[in-house]
Image (cartoon, rainbow, N blue to C red):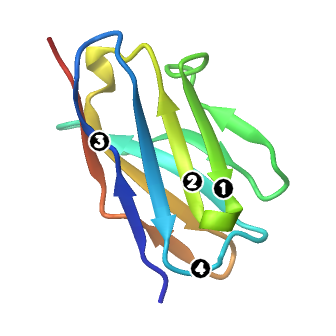
Amino acid sequence: QVHLVESGGGLVQPGGSLRLSCAASGSIFSNNAMAWYRQAPEKERELVAIIRGGGRIDYADSVKGRFTISTNNAKNTVYLQMNSLKPEDTAVYYCRIFNLKYDYWGQGTQVTVSS
């Protein structure tokens, strides 16, 4: 069983930055998609950023130019660098690592953007 543990969330002022980390307990970074999702109160979970198996990266329109997804395969970690944060970015952020054989989710980390 693989476990994903997110960290790096917290309270930040508008315009600030945070970097989220998602550490996987096992070496599962080959031929996977790695993604960050978020869910705000009373809203559906939405895709924020994804690195697909072939390396293609996509972002939600709402975060393009502000967020960057990256990985460190040696550390089995996927990151989400979030800059120029806005109040509407407030949500619980989840990482996900998946392919046709498995689908793992982290427990979520709260990000609150408020003055």
Q: Tell me, yes or no, whether the two marked residues, 1 and 4, touch with CB atoms within 8 Å.
A: no
Q: Nearer the viewer, mark 2 or mark 4?
A: 2
Q: Return the disc, 3 or 4, that comes first in the chain's sequence.
A: 3
Residue at 43%, 77% in the rendered image: 3
> 112 above or below 37?
above
Q: Which residue is mark 4?
A: 102
Q: Which residue is mark 2?
A: 78
Cα separation, mark 2 vs mark 3, equals: 14 Å
Q: Tell me, yes or no, whether the two marked residues, 2 and 1, touch with CB atoms within 8 Å.
A: yes
* Residue 100 located left or right of residue 107: right
Q: Nearer the viewer, mark 1 or mark 4?
A: 1
Instruction: From the viewer's side, name the closer residue of 104 and 78.
Output: 78
Cα separation, mark 1 vs mark 3, equals: 19 Å
Instruction: Check disc 3 and give the amino acid type.
Output: Gly
Q: Which residue is mark 1?
A: 72
Q: Return the disc, 1 or 3, that comes first in the chain's sequence.
A: 3
